[in-house]
Image (tube, coloured by chain):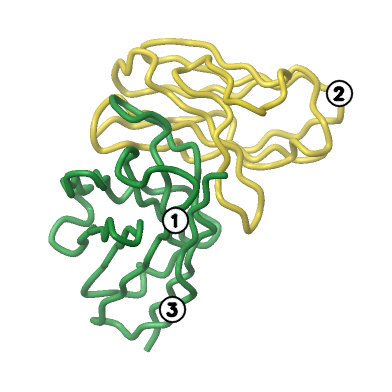
Chain colours: A green, B yellow
Amino acid sequence: QVQLVQSGPEVKTPGASVKVSCKASGYTFTSYDINWVRQATGQGLEWMGWMSPNSGNTVYAQNFQGRVTMTRDTSISTAYMELSSLRSEDTAVYYCSRGKFTSGWSPFDNWGQGTLVTVSS
Amino acid sequence: DIQMTQSPSTLSASVGDRVTITCRASQSISNWLAWYQQKPGKAPKLLIYKASSLESGVPSRFSGSGSATEFSLTISSLQPDDFATYYCQQYNSYPWTFGQGTKVEIK
């Protein structure tokens, strides 16, 4: 079955960077897009960006331009999301999710379990 | 950016009730709309995609309708497992955006 397993919780100080991993299994990693979504405590869902694991192409939300980098390692079917210049407002649960279809516009049909990133001095 | 507005923000209902949640887009998104269910401490779960297509494994009491800018999610007979927060999402154009969520509570 399709699984996305994310790395564990992180505690960072303001100004630092964090890199969250998302290991995929149960399907061909390069055939389905990966999206990253975050959720602050008690708040709604915020889309951060999209990556094609096949090409490595990315699209980032304007709110995160210049601070976020999405990459992948196809040899281990793992996607990464790195967020730099962290501030307290970045404290949130970060999710990776898979696009449902192999081409065209896709909703997100499988999600990782989430990674809590806490930014605190 | 396309703004997605859900109503109501909170809905109190009883088991067996028919409930409807509305989602409005700030511009036409054709039918590129999804609905998700989220329970506390869990990742969202895809319920409906392309406005009205039921995701595999999702009970048939869930249905979606609408196009362009007006959409709705209906639960025909609310079950105990359905008390959760529901989000709509447009995937017509970047950036993908979500509604602010509708919490369905026990009345």
- Seen from the viewer's position, the closer of residues B10 and A57 is A57
> In which quadrant will I find the C terminus of chain A?
bottom left
Instruction: Specify whether B1 is left or right of B102.
Output: left
Query: What amino acid type should be assigned to the residue bearing mark 1?
Result: Tyr
The picture places residue A45, in percent across and down from the top left corner, at 45, 48
| Dots 3, 1 in contact, CB < 8 A | no
Mark before the other along the chain sequence, 3 or 1: 3
Check disc 2 and report its element: helix, strand or loop.
loop
Taking the spot 47% from the left edge, 66% from the top edge, the residue there is A115
- Seen from the viewer's position, the closer of residues A114 and B68 is A114
The picture places residue A37, in percent across and down from the top left corner, at 39, 51
The residue that label 2 is drawn on is B16
- Seen from the viewer's position, the closer of residues A82 and B35 is A82
> In which quadrant will I find the N terminus of chain A?
top right
Looking at this view, name the residue that lies furthest to the right.
B15
Q: Of the residues tagged 1 and 2, which is closer to the observer?
A: 1
Q: CA distance from mark 3 to mark 1?
A: 13 Å
Query: What amino acid type should be assigned to the residue bearing mark 2?
Result: Gly
The residue that label 3 is drawn on is A10
Check disc 1 and report its element: helix, strand or loop.
strand
The picture places residue B88, in percent across and down from the top left corner, at 48, 31
- Seen from the viewer's position, the closer of residues B17 and A19 is A19
The picture places residue B95, in percent across and down from the top left corner, at 26, 38
The residue that label 1 is drawn on is A95
Taking the spot 53% from the left edge, 39% from the top edge, the residue there is B101
Instruction: Give the chain letter at badge 1.
Output: A
Query: What amino acid type should be assigned to the residue bearing mark 3?
Result: Glu
The residue carrying pointer 3 sits among few (fewer than 14), some (14 to 19) or many (20 or more) residues within 10 Å by Cα, namely: some
A32 in relation to B52, above or below:
below
Q: Of the residues tagged 2 and 3, which is closer to the observer?
A: 3
Taking the spot 43% from the left edge, 78% from the top edge, the residue there is A10
Instruction: Specify whether B61 is left or right of A106.
Output: right
